[in-house]
């Protein structure tokens, strides 16, 4: 416990270096920007910026990319409150009460509550991260290949459950993602798999153009087909300061949101969206006036906003301690670490302590910067919302093309992006989300490798996954997740039919 | 009562089955091996099977549960986005950024019906200058600027 704090302070000294401060600020600024602008999320943005970070030192690169991720949580709530459009999926629930508050003339306080709850959650989450990470990294001693395999299966199942649409479509996306990850040269035999004779595929499909295609190009195709209505709130935002009574209600909600979010962020498959939904449900259930939720109550803004920011941060813990990315954005961070020669996993803490603690500590600074970026400068972000989409999407595509080309200086990656853009769009038409696919794509090689090792250790006995207690517990938990989601859905579908 | 209750799902199922089939054809020549000594074909074969199973599941659902009708395909965005990206890919190494980028911006802008000539021209110039200055000059990404001569 004490170690965690002293490490956190040494991390702070890394984060406070002038260069890292600059990249932290850039990340927070870009994060807010993409959070405000609907149609461009953190996954696509990190994919676009990855090639640019090749030339930065690892700490600076990771600090910036992380800033984009949690910065997007701040920006996302701005559009949710002012335009009733969630900038990110994690701010969907903020629309419910945040937009109503704005309609009731309380736009300023709603924005302030969202930002301050996020700030509070962000700082508490950093402390929790330091504690959790220290604890979890000790747990990894008990993790063999079988446990890692089961943990990743659990994470994928959780991603399936959280995806919109049906369980079977999401499962299909997981299988497709896993299979795509195996394209290229097999590490253990050197044989080419599924390359269709393309030489450029012998190193496998690069995840940067894949993510850009699925999350940026596909999204643009969808938005061009169904233009969004953007009605920016008319009139002044007004005073930002919430009233004393609002403050009194906000504090317990923000606290609960922080803890719910921090915990859910740790789970494989978890993250900001899950955190914010869970927090809203809890706030509504324990409220003395649940019927007023959805009409502009402050608890409905404070809780979810605290939760989404807290889970965005604690979601880094499984990556930094176990090496398992728990959601698509974190999977992009895993890619960023690999590019900089850092293998995500328990060794990060021992081999690269400055990266580990510097990254965690930078989140305190980033959160403080974000409040400044968001509250006084709110007018700037609102005016950005007035830019028509037709001027905006060509710019995204320009950045995507430059990003895709720069990964390997290979035109082939642009075509990969194009291919997955169309594929992702088609999948959306079929009500299948790309999030489970990209997570499976990143986990695929790890799953194959750990499965292979587990089989070697158990001499080919597949019961090793259920005879080892931690592994069994993870698999049972995964089955339980499927059971609780499929059962009620089947019943309601039968009634519909 | 129609036989197919969800045409949209039928197409999805067919696509998954086709994908499983094509990829299985790609990996069928690879050694599968045993569970103890997994060959390169082990996981891909299992996954092709699982994709096919998911496809069959969605097919069954399409026959028994009501779902969506077939979607229409938006011809204009698909064509022009595709054309723009293809043009950039074909031009960037031969023509350089100063040729490839305006081509990209102009083509993809045609995907939106409301684009006007003046706006597109201004956007193409602005984005090209911005990219050249930021990505090539400042960040030194190795992208050719001028046509290869």
Image (spheres, helix red, strand yellow):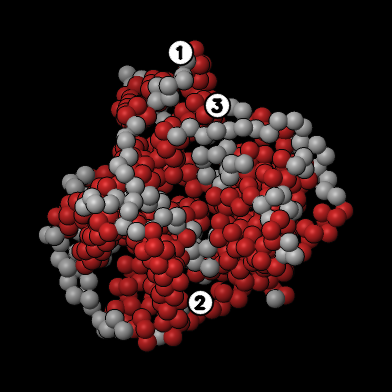
- Residue mark closest to the camera, 3 vs 2: 3
The answer to whether A139 appears left or right of B96 in the picture is right
Mark number displayed over residue A17: none
Look at the numbered discs 2 and 1 and tell me whether their residues touch, using CB distance below 8 Å. no
Above or below residue A483? Residue A54 is above
Mark 3, secondary structure of its residue: loop
- Check if mark 3 and mark 2 are on a common chain: yes
Mark 2, secondary structure of its residue: helix
- Residue mark closest to the camera, 1 vs 3: 3
Say which of B11 and A355 sits in front: B11
Residue that appears at 49% across and 48% down: A43
The answer to whether B5 appears left or right of A100 in the picture is left
The picture places residue A226, in percent across and down from the top left corner, at 45, 34
- Check if mark 2 and mark 1 are on a common chain: no
Mark number displayed over residue A388: 3
Question: How far is the residue under mark 2 from the one under mark 1?
Answer: 60 Å
Residue that appears at 56% across and 78% down: A138
**Circle 1 marks a residue in which chain?**
B
User: In this figure, which residue is indicated by the disc labeled 1?
Assistant: B117
User: In this figure, which residue is indicated by the disc labeled 2?
Assistant: A140
The picture places residue A131, in percent across and down from the top left corner, at 66, 71
Q: Residues within 10 Å of mark 2 (few under 14, many from 20)?
A: some
The outermost residue toward the top is: B118
The answer to whether A194 appears left or right of B79 in the picture is left
The picture places residue A218, in percent across and down from the top left corner, at 40, 40
**Circle 2 marks a residue in which chain?**
A
């Amino acid at each position: 416990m004490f170690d965690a704090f002293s490490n956190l302070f040494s991390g702070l000294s890394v984060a406070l270096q002038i260069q890292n401060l600059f990249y932290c600020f850039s990340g927070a600024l870009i994060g807010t920007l993409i959070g405000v602008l609907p149609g461009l999320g953190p996954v696509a943005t990190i994919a676009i910026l990855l090639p640019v970070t090749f030339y930065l030192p690892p700490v600076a690169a990771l600090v910036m990319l992380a800033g984009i991720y949690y910065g997007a949580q701040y920006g996302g709530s701005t559009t949710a409150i002012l335009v009733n459009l969630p900038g990110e999926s994690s701010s969907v629930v903020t629309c419910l009460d945040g937009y109503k508050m704005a309609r009731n003339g309380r736009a300023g306080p709603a924005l302030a509550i969202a930002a301050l709850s996020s700030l509070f959650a962000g700082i508490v989450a950093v402390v929790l991260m330091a504690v959790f990470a220290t604890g979890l990294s000790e747990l990894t001693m008990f993790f063999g290949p079988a446990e890692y395999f089961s943990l990743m299966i659990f994470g994928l199942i959780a991603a399936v459950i959280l995806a919109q649409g049906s369980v079977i479509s999401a499962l299909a996306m997981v299988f497709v993602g896993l299979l795509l990850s195996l394209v290229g040269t097999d590490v253990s035999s050197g044989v080419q798999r599924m390359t269709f004779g393309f030489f450029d595929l012998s190193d496998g499909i690069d995840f940067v153009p894949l993510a850009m295609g699925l999350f940026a190009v596909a999204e643009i195709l969808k938005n061009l087909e169904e233009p969004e209505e953007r009605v920016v709130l008319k009139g002044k935002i007004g005073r930002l300061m919430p009233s004393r009574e609002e403050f009194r209600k906000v504090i317990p909600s923000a606290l609960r949101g922080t803890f719910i979010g921090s915990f859910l962020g740790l789970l494989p498959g978890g993250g900001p969206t899950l955190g914010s939904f869970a927090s809203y449900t809890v706030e509504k259930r324990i409220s003395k006036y649940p019927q007023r939720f959805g009409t502009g109550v402050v608890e409905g803004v404070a809780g979810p906003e605290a939760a989404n920011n807290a889970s965005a941060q604690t979601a880094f813990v499984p990556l930094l301690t176990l090496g398992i990315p728990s959601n698509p954005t974190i999977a992009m961070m895993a890619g960023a670490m690999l590019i900089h020669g850092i293998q995500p996993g328990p060794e990060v803490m021992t081999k690269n302590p400055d990266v580990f603690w510097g990254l965690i500590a930078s989140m305190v600074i980033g959160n403080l910067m974000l409040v400044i970026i968001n509250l006084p400068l709110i007018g700037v972000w609102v005016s950005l919302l007035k830019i028509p989409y037709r001027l905006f999407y060509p710019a995204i595509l320009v950045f995507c093309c430059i990003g895709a080309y720069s990964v390997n200086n290979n035109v082939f990656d642009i075509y990969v992006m194009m291919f997955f853009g169309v594929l992702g769009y088609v999948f959306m038409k079929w009500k299948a989300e790309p999030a489970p696919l990209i997570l499976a794509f990143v986990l695929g090689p790890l799953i194959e490798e750990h499965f292979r090792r587990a089989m070697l250790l158990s001499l080919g006995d597949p019961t090793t996954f259920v005879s080892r207690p931690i592994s069994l517990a993870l698999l049972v938990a995964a089955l339980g997740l499927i059971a609780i989601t499929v059962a009620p859905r089947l019943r309601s579908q039968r009634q519909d039919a | 009562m129609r036989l197919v209750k969800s045409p949209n799902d039928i197409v999805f199922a067919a696509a998954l089955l086709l994908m499983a089939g094509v990829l299985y054809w790609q990996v069928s020549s690879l050694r599968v091996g045993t569970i103890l000594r997994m060959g390169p074909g082990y996981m891909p074969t299992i996954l092709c099977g699982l994709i096919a199973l998911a496809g069959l599941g969605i097919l069954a659902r399409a026959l028994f549960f009501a779902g969506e009708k077939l979607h229409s395909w938006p011809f204009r965005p698909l064509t022009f986005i595709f054309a723009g990206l293809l043009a950039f890919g074909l031009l960037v190494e031969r023509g350089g950024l100063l040729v490839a980028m305006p081509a990209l911006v102009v083509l993809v802008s045609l995907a939106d019906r409301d684009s006007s000539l003046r706006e597109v021209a201004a956007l193409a110039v602005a984005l090209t200058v911005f990219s050249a200055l930021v990505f090539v000059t400042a960040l030194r990404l190795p992208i050719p600027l001028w046509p290869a001569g």
